[in-house]
Amino acid sequence: MVEKVKKLPKLFQYFKDEDQFAGGVAFCAGCPLELTLRIMSKVLGRETVIVGTPSCSAPVLYGQNIGSWHRLPYYSCLMTGVASSATGLTRYYRKAGRDVNVVCFTGDGCAADIGFQTLSGAAERNENIIYVCYENEGYMNTGIQRSSTTPRGATTSTTPVGPAGRGKTTPPKNVPLIMAMHHIPYVATATLSNMDDFVRKLLKAVEKKQEGFVYLHVFTPCPVGWGIESDMSIEVCRMAVKTNYFPLWEAENGIFRLTHNEVNPEPITKYTKLFRKYNHLNDTELAVAQEDVNSNFAFLRHLTTFGTKDKNVKK
Amino acid sequence: MKAKEGELKVITGNSAAAYGAMLCRPDVVASYPITPQTEVVEQLSRFHADGILDAEMVEVEGENSAMNIVAAATLAGGRAFTATSSWGLVYMYDAVLQAAGFRAPVVMANVNRETPGILAVSSGQQDMISTRDAGWIQLIVENSQEILDTIIMAFRLAEDYDIQLPVMVNYDGFYLSYLAEGVRIPTREDVDKYLAILKTQPQRTILNPQKPIGAGSHGILTEFMELRYKHCAALERAKKKLDEIDCEFGEFFGRSYGGQIEEYRTEDADIIILTSGSTVGTTRTVVDAKRTAGLKVGLIKLRMFRPFPREKLIQTITGKKAVGVIDRSVCFGWNCGPIYMELRALSPEIGRIPIMSFIDGLANIDITTPHIERAINDVHKASKGEPYQEVTWIPLEEYL
Amino acid sequence: MKEIRFHGRGGQGAVLAARMLAIACVREGKCVASFPMYGFERRGAPVVAFTRLDDKPIMEKTQIYNPDCLVVIDPDLIKLPTLFSGLKPDGILILNSPRVFEKQPNENLKLAGIINATHIAVEEVGRDVPNTCLLGAFAAVTGWVGLQSVISSVGEYFSGEVLRKNARCVERGYNEVKGIKWQ
Amino acid sequence: MAVKKFSSKYEAAWSDADALLLCLDTGSWRTKRPVVNKEKCSYCGLCSIYCPPQCMVTKKDYFDPNLEFCKGCGICARECPRSAIIMMPEGDFTP
């Protein structure tokens, strides 16, 4: 007989609302995106409007004719208009004297690529918006094409591997760092294996959105697109953190801080072997991948050493 | 009850647009500068800085964002205004379509400027034509006073419970945008009174965080068609509604513009010139001169381009001997003017009379008195049974 | 209806002058319509502006091809080959120039008002902004608008010391313009 | 032609969860079923936290999947620190 835990983890206390989604919605089995959304709906509460786009989340977030898959107020945009539409909403609610969490929810394809201009514009204007990007390193809904956050070496349907192709040739854009350079009050990365960290950052986001633009970059691997077994997606998140491939950090008022410190990071191969998108990488290419991780992390670590407030951060 | 006369100010068309918008007390204004519209943005920012305009001003990073912002603000329950021109309209094209499909009651001033392919910082209605099938209500105006008045009426029309559609108020760039005229500025209180009727109407559906409701649901199958049907039906209703609104406006402010179309000396006319925008003003003087010379010519000013005022046009034109249409844009693939093309679609009702297309005024070319005289003379000859040329590019013919 | 064509260069205030004149006329109960014609707004580039005045509403929206009067803000523009094109018989010219000329430059030109507006502007305002001075000269030579109306229209754009200086320019233009008549 | 009756009361594309909350029968997607060993379950809640459809239901002192919606992804079994959940083929259960 095992000893029973008396109390559920503290995490459960953060859930101030019920899951706002119907029990059965159209996400692939094992998709962390579904988990991201359901947790968000529990943590953010009802004074929330989600602004989203055509993407993997659309078949769930969008209604279908008069029916809806969830009980969250929702505004469906085109991919070019997420942060701008959210601006329209948040400005009007402000004018009407209402405190509403206007939450953009998009993939990296929208945030980093086609919707990047409006994201950057809204951040520069420091709109009171929480922008959550679920990072799955490609255009998953249209069938796994590369995006500007697809990592070097990864295979996608537009960067296939063959006699003349070795996957994507350029390193990814670091969107959360770019957003931090907009001098906004809060930027953070998160992933689902570290759920406490994610939920704490969501709550922080609600608080910091009063000061202006908040950007959360949530690592959300795609089981289908990356070739992950459906039960392994949380483990992939975990290993991304443990290898420092996806370090967890935040920048509050310009002060960079690691929210999770990996004392003995695992080699990148422990991460890359978990799924198929890197199967073709040879030792040289894996060494490059390891170097990419090392240099990115060193750069981030350097940022955390400043420790002084960015005086440019908007109020 | 009558409105006060209002202060007479000498202002440009752009400034008149800004005054019109300001007087309607928008909640959100988002607009990106572009020649020849820039003065609208500047003037609104000035109003805001002077404390006259209590709106959320969004200094956007592009037109696409401007349109998304104003559309979302109206769907959240607010009143919103934007202004653009030419490539700006093109850059917001996806959002323009979305605003219409969402039935967002946005009001936008579009300062007409040439668009496709050949870069031209000059007047032309081609930008407006590129969005004629976007599902918007499109109005075209003639002078600065009408710009101001029509923007007020546009809010009245867009937000009407029976309509709920975005309205684009078009005026010629350069010829009207920079035209300074004496304009009566209504008082804010009177504009409030004029728009107060909207508050008596049922609340339109809005995105309210307390309600589990989503804007922009996926429409599928017959439900999708149902929404399209409702959109088209609302556009049909907008025609009569504009006439009513124009009458209300006239009764209250003492100025009215005829609603969908304005007829000028058409009643006993044998031949008709149909045109729009700044050209109408000049055409009036030519019609007067021709009348003095004994020619029975009348003028129809097209104020509403979408929805197309087919019933009004059929009613006015039926029985006339010939019609000439002066367009400041072209209809690609038909080699004629767009308004002409649309009028031709009414041929079965109007009867077999000569209908002629005159293309003029592209890229700032001045539609001069001699150009209009030439068009009237050609239509007159055609009305007498002489052979005629269907499409005439007036400035090129003169040149060649 | 009177039709006036302004010729200047970007930055000299031709557009503003046309608009001030329009305001002055509205103050006297006249109807006006005024607009410039340019594409890109660039300092130094030639600018044309049009103003129409009438007792009844003005319908024409075209450029002015047969002006009753030309107002030339830049002295150099007198050399413009097309300057006098379309000038009506009994045409009037208001010219900013340090030199008075005797020879009739165009057969339709019957009256010229010449004033060294640049010099006056530099003296009064301290900068080369000859437009308000030329409006004073315009009022004196044409008689189509009163001096006080012009001064009051300048008040729409300036206040305080700058207004006072510009009002001086208008007055000096009105008083010091030299009229030349031809048969 | 005039349409007499509309299926939606809205003029535009509004979805309304009060009027119609849609739901998929995702339970039928499952090829494997999580089976919880109540004795081994320590009631730590990790299966519930990581379950993408959030369908691990709190019982008295253990968790149990709501099979109506469970897609059978197996994350609960993978993440359970006590290995108290095993995935069994649906075919093993008689209908």
Image (cartoon, rainbow, N blue to C red):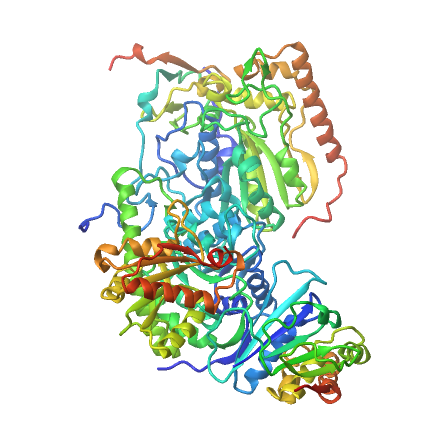
Q: Residue at x 47, y 80 (%)?
A: B6
Residue A59 pos. (x, y %) = 39, 34
Q: How far from the left and from the top, in percent, is residue B182? A: 51, 77
Q: Position of residue B371 (x, y in %)?
A: 45, 65
Measured along the vertical axis of the image, is residue B295 above or below residue B237?
Answer: below
Q: In which quadrant will I find the N terminus of chain B?
A: bottom left
Against C51, residue B305 (above or below) is: above
**Residue B17: percent from left, percent from top:** 50, 66
Q: Residue at point 65% right, 68% down?
A: C82
A87 relative to C143, above or below: above
Residue at horizontal 73 percent and vertical 86 percent from the top:
C177
Q: Does residue A90 show up?
A: no
Horizontal arrangement in the rendering, residue C104 relative to residue B249 (left or right): right
Q: Is residue A45 visible?
A: yes
Against B240, residue C109 (above or below) is below
Q: Is residue A266 left or right of residue B207?
A: right
Q: Name the residue nearer the viewer: B62 or B188.
A: B62
Tag count: 0
Question: Hey, which quadrant is residue C3 in on the image?
Answer: bottom right
Which quadrant of the figure has residue B196? bottom left
Give the camera-side residue of A186 and C114: C114
